[in-house]
Image (cartoon, rainbow, N blue to C red):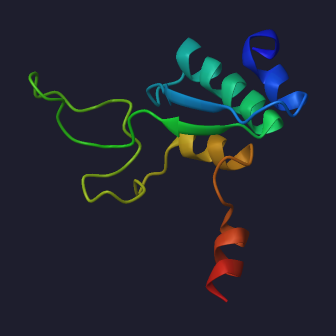
């Protein structure tokens, strides 16, 4: 990734936007890849869009969107989500402390 796009950030040449990446929340190869990827993006301070954030049935097939990180009410899932935890851990989401400070 460094040779493909991260060097642009490292050398302060231009901003980089990483679009449409995601995975399911089940343990395994895909979630391991996700963790390594978001850790790298956190180190690079890259901007991004997770895909998809939404929840509910996929159009045309009716099965739930397994990559979605929100509950049907468009709020964080009550049981939590390891992907949100990873994004927060690597600085790609505000921490609870950051949220509390912004509310003061």
Disc tally is 0
Left or right: residue 31 versus residue 40 is: left
| Residue 20, horizontal then vertical, whole percent | 47, 28
Identify which residue, 65 or 17, lies in the foreground.
Answer: 17
Left or right: residue 37 versus residue 11 is: left
Q: Is residue 53 above or below residue 9?
A: below
Q: For the view shown, which residue lies furthest in the front direction?
A: 13
Q: Is residue 18 above or below residue 91?
A: above
Q: Which residue is located at x 32 percent, y 43 percent?
A: 54
User: Is there any visible trace of residue 40 in the rendered image?
Assistant: yes
Left or right: residue 69 versus residue 41 is: left
| Residue 84, horizontal then vertical, whole percent | 55, 45
Identify which residue, 85 or 12, lies in the foreground.
Answer: 12
Q: Is residue 65 above or below residue 93?
A: above
| Residue 12, horizontal then vertical, whole percent | 87, 34
User: Is there any visible trace of residue 28 in the rendered image?
Assistant: no
Q: Which residue is located at x 10 percent, y 22 percent?
A: 61
């Amino acid at each position: 990734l460094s040779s493909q796009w991260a060097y642009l950030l490292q050398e302060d040449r231009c901003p980089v936007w990483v679009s449409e990446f995601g995975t399911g929340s089940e343990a395994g190869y895909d979630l391991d890849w996700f963790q390594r990827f978001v850790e790298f993006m956190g180190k690079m301070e890259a901007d991004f869009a997770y895909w998809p954030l939404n929840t509910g049935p996929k159009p045309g097939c009716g099965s739930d969107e397994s990559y979605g990180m929100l509950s049907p009410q468009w709020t964080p899932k009550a049981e939590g989500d390891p992907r949100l935890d990873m994004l927060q851990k690597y600085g790609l989401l505000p921490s609870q402390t950051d949220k509390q400070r912004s509310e003061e």
